[in-house]
Amino acid sequence: MIFLTFFLGLIANFIGYIPPGNINLTLVRITINRGMQHALQFITAFSIVEFFFTFFIMHAAQWLSSQVHLDVVIDWVMFALFLVLGIITWLARNHPPKTKYSEHASIKYGIILGIVNPMQVPFWMICGTYLITHEWIEIGTGALIIFSLGSAAGSFLCLFLYAKFARYIQSKFALSNRIINTAIAILFFGLAGYHLVKRVYLAVKPRVVVINKIKSVDEQFLIGQWDNIKSTYVTKTKRGMITSIDSQSVLCNVCPVIIFSDDHTASIKSDTALQKIFRWNIVNKKLSIKNITKDRIIDDGSYGMTTFVDSISKKLELRDTLKGLLYTLR
C-alpha cells in the first residue's frame, strides 16, 4: 500500500508537469542560459517545496472546493505571473547570458516559484479528491506524507527530463539564446493572453436561464422530508479495519426534521416555522452541502450518495471519505 501511494503521487504529478507552463518554461530558460548545474539546483529546490505544497493542498482540498470564486482568483494570478515572466524573458532576449551567477540564485528561484504555483491548486483539488474519494489512497497523515513524497519525485523526474530535452534541442539545432528566449517569451505572453481572454469572455458572456429544468433521479429521491438522521464518524486502523466512533442518532422528536426543497435549499421544521439552514446541489452523483446558518445538521462537504428503497421506507447514505463521516437519512 505504501508503494502504491508513492507511485500514484509520482505518476499524477509527473503528468501534471508535462503541459507547458510557468514552471517548465522557466526551467528551460534557466537550462539554456545558465547550464545544467543551475537547472538541477532549481529542480531540487522546487521539488522540496512541492512536497509541502502537495501535503497542504491535499489537506485543504475539502475547504478549497467550497470556495466559489477560487477559479477567478487563480486565473488573474496566472495572468499576472505569465505576463511578468514574459516581460522579463523578452527584455533579456538581446542580452548575452552571464558567465557567472550567484550560487543560490536558482535555488531561490525554485523556492519562489514552488510557493507561487497557483495552477497546482485546481490540479490537486480534482486529482487528489478523486483518488481519496475512490479510496486509492488513505486520508491519514502518514499516507499523505508518502503521497506528497511521490508527488515531489514526480515533479523532479518530469522537470529533469525537460532540462535534458532543452539541452538536446539547443545542441542539436544550434539555436541561439536569443531565439530560444524569444520563443519562451511568446509562449508566456500567449498563456497570459489565454487567462485574460477567458476571464473577459466569462464576464461578458450572457448567462443562460434554465426554466423548468428536469430534475435528476437523485434530486427526485432527495427532495422531501427526512425524519431520522444518524451521523457516524468512521476511522481506519493501521491494518485497514474499519471502526466507527462517536455515532449518534438525531430523531425527529428530539430535533426538527429536515426538508430538502426543489430550490436547492434545505430547511428545518419546528412547529409551523421553516428555517433555511444550507444550500445543496448534486453534481456527478455527489451531494454538495454549504451551510448558511450555525445549525449544522449536516456538515459542509461533498458527499457520495447511496440510496435504498423497500416497500416500507427509503434510506439515503451520505459519505464524506475525506472526513470519515457518514450520514444516514430515513
Image: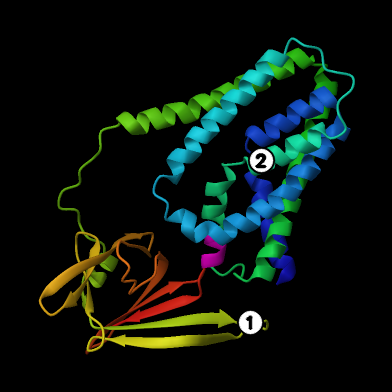
Observer-nearest residue: 197 or 109?
Answer: 109
Q: Residue at x 71, y 48 (%)?
A: 49
The residue tagged 1 is 240
Q: Farthest left residue?
A: 272
Q: CA distance from mark 1 to mark 2?
A: 34 Å
Which range is magenta? 129-133
Observer-nearest residue: 122 or 180?
Answer: 122
Q: Farthest front residue?
A: 294
* Residue 18 position in % (x across, y down): 66, 40
Say which quadrant the N terminus sits in: bottom right
Q: Amino acid at mark 2?
A: Ile
Determine if residue 10 is in view. Answer: no
**Label total for image:** 2
The residue tagged 2 is 18
Q: Helix, strand or loop at disc 1?
A: loop
* Residue 289 position in % (x across, y down): 35, 64
* Residue 193 position in % (x across, y down): 50, 24
